[in-house]
Amino acid sequence: MHLLVAEPAALSPARAIVETILDEVENAASRFRPDSEISLLSAAGGVQTTVSRVLADLIDAALTAARWTGGDVDPTVGSAMLALGYDRDIADVDPSMSPLSSFTIPADWSMVEFDGRIVRLPPGVLLDLGATAKAVAADWCAQRVHLQTGSAVLVNLGGDMATAGPPPDGGWHVLVQDTDDDPPSQIALGADTGLATSSTCRRRWRHAGELVHHIVDPRTGRSAEPVWRSISVAAASCLAANTISTAAIVRGYRAPDWIATLGVPARLIGRTGAVRTLGRWPQS
């Protein structure tokens, strides 16, 4: 996590705010913790469960993203993730492992019953909020820091960035570069902006002899075809940016035309390292 504030005196209270929010999100939504709310929800066996306000808001964001992308970003890919061997923190996944499990439970976001606070999952359906929860957390952190300290702020949670408040002169300068082999791009972010990069290169390992990555096509239960090494998007929120970049990875060759209809700035890196930018990509 990186935390930048425009007012030095705001740093200490800002850090406390961010750490509190991240603890709340971790306790609510980490599928790698057996005591998290989402793990307990998945084990509820189809029983209606009242969840905390934090998890409710995270589930609401995930279902909104699924609805808006036509299911390209789907929080019910938990079983598919497990079948691919992504059953622990990525730092602990053996990149050469070949798990024997297989994806057998058909699921999609429309199967989740949710009324704003009470959730029911069909038995066997596992939620994975990885495509949206970190982005929502970045937005929450930036907004709350600015609200409570008055300082302009940039929060970076592993590449999911959010800003709030008037930025320093010239904006927040950020280097966009997914891997050391990718061409870099120096950009400037303004106030109340989100930036997210979805990558097929960062989180990957071997499954049954095949190189796989963590962005799952919900319709197949397999890693999306790696048409793009990475896609970076700037939008009005980190949630919007990450939803678009993740869906674009799933859409593959159709991604540029779809992003163009949205009118958001984006930068796409192809398999060979070729760069394509769309919209007013904020190159500085």
Image (cartoon, grey):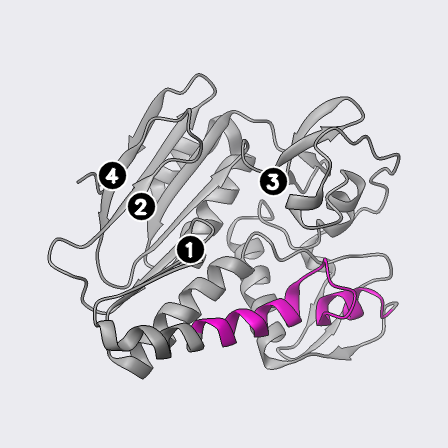
* Circle 3 or circle 4, nearest the eye: 4
Which residue is located at x 36 percent, y 68 percent?
142
Residue beneath disc 4: 186
Tell me which numbered mark, 3 or 4, is placed earlier along the sequence: 4
* Residue 20 counted in the magenta span: yes
- Which numbered mark, 4 or 1, is in the foreground of this view? 4
Few, some or many residues within 10 Å of mark 2 (<14, 14–19, 20+): some
- Name the main secondary structure of what is drawn in magenta: helix
Q: Quadrant of the C terminus?
A: top left
Q: Which residues are magenta?
A: 18-44
Q: Mark on residue 240?
A: 1
Q: Earlier in the sequence, mark 4 or mark 1?
A: 4
Q: CA distance from mark 2 to mark 4?
A: 17 Å
How far across and down, in percent of the image, does residue 202 sit? 54, 36
Residue of label 3: 215
Q: Secondary structure at mark 3?
A: loop
The mark lying in front, picked from 3 and 2, is 3
